[in-house]
């Protein structure tokens, strides 16, 4: 066994877990959210112990971000139930939804690049 091999497995496991969480969050939001805004899951990160996860979202139109986050917070338990039935994650992490400000910055840089400012 090589030094660091168990750590690599943990990273692979965490990577698969975050992919599953992000994928299932997108499915859940697509099924549950109304037409008032477009909520897009951009990524998920898993806490160091696997007991917490943060799902980052972008919202369009941007002024609907707070109401979208409020909707997600109200439906957090429903999403946890969704995760329980659609994944084999153990332990099931406590989910927090956050706006993806990095995505907003990237979009702004794209705008600047296209306009030549």
Image: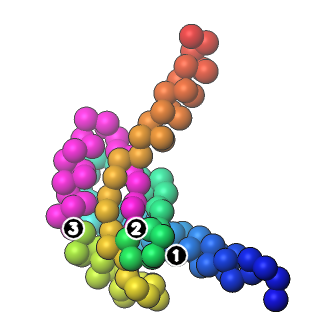
Residue indicated by mark 1: 17
Magenta extent: 53-75
Q: In terms of sequence position, does the residue under pointer 3 or pointer 2 come before the other?
A: 2
- Contact (Cβ within 8 Å) of mark 1 with mark 3: no
Residue indicated by mark 3: 75
Q: In terms of sequence position, does the residue under pointer 1 or pointer 3 come before the other?
A: 1
Q: What element carries label 2?
A: strand
- Contact (Cβ within 8 Å) of mark 2 with mark 1: yes
Indicate how the structure is coloured in the image. rainbow
Measure how far apart labels 2 and 1 are at the Cα level: 10 Å
The 10 Å Cα crowd at callout 2, few under 14, some 14 to 19, many 20 or more, is many
Residue indicated by mark 2: 53
Q: Is residue 64 magenta?
A: yes
In the rendered view, tell whether residue 83 sits above or below residue 88.
above
* Residue furthest right as drawn: 2
Q: In terms of sequence position, does the residue under pointer 2 or pointer 1 come before the other?
A: 1
Measure how far apart labels 3 and 2 are at the Cα level: 15 Å
Q: Does the magenta stretch include residue 58?
A: yes
> What residue is drawn where x is 57% and y is 28%?
110
* Residue furthest top as drawn: 117
> What residue is drawn where x is 41% and y is 54%?
56
> What residue is drawn where x is 25% and y is 60%?
72
Measure how far apart labels 1 and 3 are at the Cα level: 20 Å
Find residue 51 and report its horizontal and vertical position in percent: 39, 77
The N terminus - image quarter: bottom right
């Amino acid at each position: 066994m090589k030094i660091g091999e168990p750590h690599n497995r943990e990273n692979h496991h965490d990577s698969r877990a975050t992919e599953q969480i992000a994928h299932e969050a997108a499915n859940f939001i697509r099924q549950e959210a109304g037409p008032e805004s477009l909520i897009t899951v951009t990524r998920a990160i898993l806490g160091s112990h696997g007991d917490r996860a943060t799902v980052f979202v972008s919202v369009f139109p941007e002024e609907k971000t707070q109401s979208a986050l409020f909707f997600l917070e109200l439906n957090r338990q429903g999403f946890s139930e969704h995760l329980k039935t659609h994944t084999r994650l153990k332990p099931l992490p406590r989910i927090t939804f956050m706006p993806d400000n990095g995505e907003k910055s990237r979009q702004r840089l794209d705008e600047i690049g296209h306009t030549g400012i």
